[in-house]
Amino acid sequence: MARTGNKNIQAKLVLLGDMGTGKTSMVLRFTKGQFFDFQESTIGAAFFTQVLSLNEATIKFDIWDTAGQERYHSLAPMYYRGAAAAVVVYDITSMDSFERAKKWVIELQRQGNPNLIMFLVGNKVDLEEKRKVGNEEAEQYAKENGLVFLETSAKTAQNVNELFYEIAKRLTKKVPSRPTGMKLHRRPQETGRRRQLPRFPQLFVRMLVYQIELHCGPSDLKIKAALNEK
Amino acid sequence: MYQTHSKREFAIEFQPQIQILRPSIHSRRANLLVKFQDLYGFTVEGNVDDVNILNEVREKVRQQGRVWWALEASKGANWYLQPQVSSLTEGIALKSSLKLSNLANAITLKRLIRKGIPPVLRPKVWFSLSGAAKKKSTVPESYYNDLSKAVEGKVTAATKQIDHDLPRTFPGHPWLDTPEGHAALRRVLVGYSFRDSDVGYCQGLNYVAALLLLVMKTEEDAFWMLAVLLENVLVSDCYTNNLSGCHVEQRVFQDFLAKKCPRIAAHLEELEFDVSLVATEWFLCLFSKSLPSETTLRVWDVLFYEGAKVLFHVALAIFKMKEEELLLTHHVGDVINILHKTTHHLFDPDELLTVAFDKIGSMTTNTISKQRKKQEPAVMAELDQRLRRLNSIKMDDEK
Ligand SMILES: Nc1nc2c(ncn2[C@@H]2O[C@H](COP(=O)(O)OP(=O)(O)OP(=O)(O)O)[C@@H](O)[C@H]2O)c(=O)[nH]1
Ligand SMILES: [Mg+2]
């Protein structure tokens, strides 16, 4: 996994959202390129890993895909604890799922790591004719709450890889002193654009080490060592 | 009556050899994955070794059947259904009053059940030994049909969630994933959601009820098995509101792991691996989503006779079997992957159950009850704390 000449980041990612919004489908689309019209419901949580290589770094995602049913939410803290990024998913054909997503956002804002990168994702855009949650409404909400907003379809794969690339990029770029905020918000169509690499590699490495400690905890000595070697 | 019989017969019709669904020229090479159907119609992926193991398991099941018939011949028909033999319902006091022959039978039966109930006898044996038959006998004969009729067409939060989950319950299964299968599963789950509105519908029960349907062959019996499971066999509140019972079981399990497999427990603690990351699904689906079908049902054979402690035995055994491998892990993800691979490939039930009952050592129901009592306050406090947090969120919303 570790490629020479590259930085390695291990990051915990958690997906939250109402039952049936497509959390598992989205992860399966990303990790295996698969989609099933009928995806088994998740009990407790499912775990996936995926490695993404950017120019700047190689990111190894530990993905926790949680169960959506309300009563399972009592388990959620175990999964979002220590996460570097959280993806809150709703189904664009269900207003209830959007309302539930808002509750997740609030819970995460209060409970999670203040440096948590939060994404709001409206899934199932292939069902445009059944849409109940407007794009503008969700985007507005995301802007107000400092979330990155995307609309996806696990079925057609629209924006799914983009979502994870965007998360990866933000994980590598995130400057600790800058809180997650509105400045991080960009429109989905801009996501393809590459940002400039920092000019000072030394500083960049130190930033990364800091970040890794922040998101993965100091126990991740292997990565720190790998970075220090550079 | 519901016509649920015909298509389900495949479940107990033993094909002499496992059919490989996608045979390939290379399938002889053991490292290649093939898809095949197991005893209960589930499509599983495995290598050729797994196929061979499954064929051996079929042979063992047949042999075990012969043992049961032989005993039936010597002890009389249905000897195993004597109610006082059931360790689930008997008290200690009752035990001492048992006749010696009954005691001998109980010991034989316990041993026999740990070796597996022949699939054709499962419906009868489970129904009686679990206490489902007794439960059913306390209500009018027409209870289930009346219930089904009474709730027909009613829409509740639970029914909506059930409808959502029907096609997501073992999708692709040749009987469960048909309109007939969906309808039967729906009636069982909806019926139960009205019987116990505290439980309503909890995700996970769909898998349990589906497997019960496959085994019991009639909806009504599956319904009563579900009822006795939730109301008598398992710890209470496993599936209600905030799954508090399940949270308690997870903590009890954590304690048992520390006691029975101290090296593993210490290592996992270092990795900050919480056992409930994997065990929640095991306990809520009673392994039906993790273990191959015949292995799951072998666990259930013992579960219905010996009670919920069996879940601890089996969960501990899964860790125990992989002790050396687990001790080498450096990362939570590796632990999960090892456990996943292990459970999905446990095609030989005896491999698991031997460890579960011979290597784990005994756990009395009494110790478990004490452990549960000990853990309850902490779980309740934790759940309460989260609830208060959520309520403060609500209050803020209203401002
Ligand atoms: N049309 C459409 N269907 C989707 C999409 N994503 C998921 N689905 C379907 O929606 C259903 C639920 O998807 P899951 O991925 O299981 O949803 P989940 O959020 O993981 O659900 P829980 O595990 O119950 O919390 C499945 O039957 C999927 O096939 C999508 O983008 N478009
Ligand atoms: Mg899911």
Image (tube, rainbow, N blue to C red):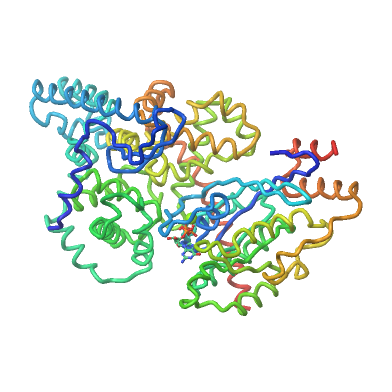
A28 relative position to A227: left or right: left
- The residue lying toward the viewer, choosing from B195 and B53, is B53
**Residue in the picture at 21% in, 26% down:** B62
**Residue in the picture at 46% in, 76% down:** A130
**Residue in the picture at 51% in, 40% down:** B251
Q: Position of residue A146 (x, y in %)?
A: 71, 69
Q: Position of residue A184 (x, y in %)?
A: 75, 66
**Residue in the picture at 38% in, 25% down:** B351
Judge whether A176 appears above or below B392 on screen: above
Q: Quadrant of residue B389?
A: bottom right
Judge whether B315 appears above or below A174 on screen: above
A91 relative position to B7: left or right: right
**Quarter occupied by the C terminus of chain B:** bottom right
Q: Position of residue B395 (x, y in %)?
A: 60, 72
Q: Position of residue B179 (x, y in %)?
A: 25, 60
* Residue A148 visible in the displayed image: yes
* Residue A72 visible in the displayed image: no
**Quarter occupied by the N terminus of chain B:** bottom left
A12 relative position to B264: left or right: right
Judge whether A94 appears above or below B116 on screen: below
- The residue lying toward the viewer, choosing from B12 and B226, is B12
